[in-house]
Amino acid sequence: MYQKGDVILGGLFEVHYFTVFPELSFTSEPQQLYCEGFTSCGFQQAQTMAFAVDEINRNPDLLPNIKLGYQLYDDCQKLGVSLRAAMSLASGREKEFLLDETCSGSPPVLGIVGDPGSTNSIAISSVLGLFRVPMVSHYATCSCLSDRSKYPSFFRTIPSDSFQVRAMIQILHRLGWTWVGLVFSDDDYGVYAARSFHSSLAESGGCVAYSQVLPKDNRPTELQRIVGEIKSSTARVVVVFSNEAYLLPLVDEVVVQNVKGLQWIASEAWSTSSVFHTPRLMPYLGGTLGIAIRRGEIPGLKDYLLSIRPDDQPANNPGNNMVRQFWEAVFGCRLEPPASWVEAGGDVCTGQEDLRDVETDCGDVSELRPEYNVYKAVYALAHALHDLLQCVPGRGPFSGHRCASLQRLEPWQVVHYLERVNFTTGFGDRVSFDDNGDALAIYDIMNWVWLQDGSVQVETVGVIDESAPAGQELTLDEDRIFWNFESKKPPRSVCSESCPPGTRVARKKGEPVCCFNCISCAEGEVSNTTDSAECLRCPEDFWSSPERDLCIPKGVEFLSYQESLGISLMTASLLGALICAVVLGIFTPGFGALLGYIGLLAFLSFLLAFLARNLPDNFNEAKFITFSMLIFCAVWISFVPAYVSSPGMYADAVEIFAILASSFGLLVALFGPKCYIILLRPERNTKKALMGRATTKT
């Protein structure tokens, strides 16, 4: 499609989805490839650009006295076709640009709207970036395109996948889903989105249970393997970065294996796709949550689309065949059909058919999402050109404070103003670009509601606005979400439940960080937070609570006189005290006498020990001392571990028992045999008895 103008804007759209390559023999002039498989969505986007250009031309406040024109190409979803069209637009040398027989060609384009595909946009912007030709895509979301060193003149009115990934992470965090599966397409869109999702989810504390790549050739064995992995995993949430063409074969396999009970999270590439809204798929995909690009309203677009007529487009103008192909696809007839078509009974289009009499997606403007981005892209280029023409001589941004002129306008000069565009649409959305050429990220959160009559309604249940204050980016109405589960509640999707206070996290070896065991804190240790990495030891004067979540002061505890342990220990203590009292009563103390008595005893003990050094073995003194020391050592060696391991008041009881046992042990072992001889066997307390063994020696 082509329209004259003082300034030409180019456009690249996916009007067809299949490219036919004729056989090349090179014995004659090669035939041009052609496209098949008409898509009304791509046509509607192309017509939205034409509508925006016409609207700007009617606006006296925007680009006054300047008429915009356009040259729109169909890329057939093929990189080679798209790249060739872009080069034709940038050079202005394609024969379709020739307006008349004077060979006066139209001016080269100063900007291109498109391409919608990330892969195509990467290739095209790599080439156009060398010449600084501005390119504003309405649907290419690959985060790689934010690299200004590689794509210096690339802009887009759709948020980057990096924003989309952050939006998904916020939803997962809000609903408590930390254990999710990931499926993505094997292209630039899917690979870059998956890479960003992996890192962002890890930073937020989540884990990917599995990561599967959709095969390009739709191999049944590979699809069966992927669905088997999804089915066997404990993750109940599946995040998918793909378009419907890659995803549909996988969903068919999900139906075959009857995999239900999953919560699907859709990327913007398929979150609003109606191809999945069938009674066959809804038992499996009902309740899907998705990220969708911002919906907008374009007043007057519906009437413009319904007023399209094929006779408004000259048939002899190359490139103006989109409307004719659209007309034939909608009404099932042919304009200027060949004889074979008529002979076969095919209908002939009159060109006077009315689009209001048929059901077509072309007139549906209730869900303008990519079309709204096309609309904003055209206006962004128009505002950049308008600001360029408003430059005051001597105050320009270029070297020497020069301004750009329309007669010698260079594309790179438009890039300078495009980077500084800032305006508000009629729908109330602000349009501007950041340092990477990315638009402000605003997403709608969509929910697939499965109605009782079997139909599907896609409802907006929330919004994510990256320009909102920190912590307020996500607005989600959970009460309006349809959950496709018997409980009608969101599912739990975690590898391990959170560890409550009083426990600590113990990672499982060889498994993701989201998979762990909960270990109770030991005696004297506590943890007062959920998912604590370690237990903290209480101060010396504190105990841990029974739940191990709080340190409490140690209470002073006493042995009770009513307890058996207290009674026995007190009895032993009183017995020792009584013995001391009896001795004290009989042998009353006297200071001077006491010292003399002790000195006399010491002298006599020394004298007797000296005289008895060679006495026979009947004294057995060494044996008694050895036995008493064995008792003493045994008591105090066993005392140490018993004291350490005894809690509270029992530690004091152990200490008392050790003191009494060692004291009475020494007393009995040393003096027991002597008292036995003196009191019970006095006849043996003689010198003869003591020397008995000595007399038998020779």
Image: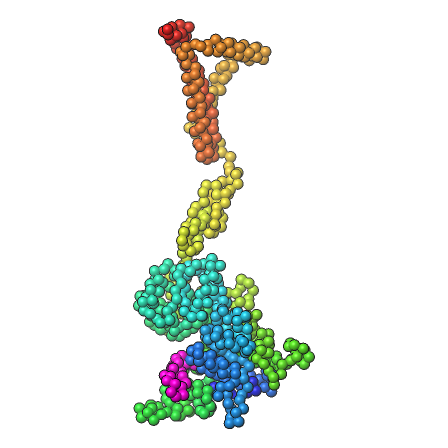
User: Can the viewer see residue 600?
Assistant: yes
Return the x and y of residue 100 as percentages of the image width and height.
51, 93
Q: Spot the residue most to the right.
A: 394
Please indicate whether residue 370 sits to the left or right of residue 329 in the image: right
Please indicate whether residue 338 sits to the left or right of residue 172 in the image: left
Q: Residue sitting at 48 percent across and 77 percent down?
A: 115
Q: In this picture, is 456 found above or below 519?
A: below
Q: Quadrant of the C terminus?
A: top left
Q: In which quarter of the image is residue 59?
A: bottom right
Q: In which quarter of the image is residue 650?
A: top left
Residue 38 lies within the magenta run: yes
Colouring rule applied to residues:
rainbow
Return the x and y of residue 651 as percentages of the image width and height.
47, 32
Return the x and y of residue 343 as percentages of the image width and height.
31, 93
Q: Find the magenta span and give its range.
A: 13-39
Return the x and y of residue 450 as percentages of the image width and height.
38, 70
Q: In which quarter of the image is residue 404?
A: bottom right
Q: In this picture, is 565 found above or below 547?
A: above
Please indicate whether residue 521 sits to the left or right of residue 596 in the image: left
Q: Looking at the image, how many numbered discs can be counted on the residues?
A: 0
Q: Residue sitting at 44 percent across and 72 percent down?
A: 269
User: Can the viewer see residue 482?
Assistant: no
Q: Residue sitting at 55 percent across and 73 percent down?
A: 152
Q: Residue sitting at 50 percent across and 74 percent down?
A: 126
Front in this rendered view, residue 389 or 235: 389
Q: Spot the residue most to the front.
A: 27
Front in this rendered view, residue 439 or 20: 20
Residue 394 lies within the magenta run: no
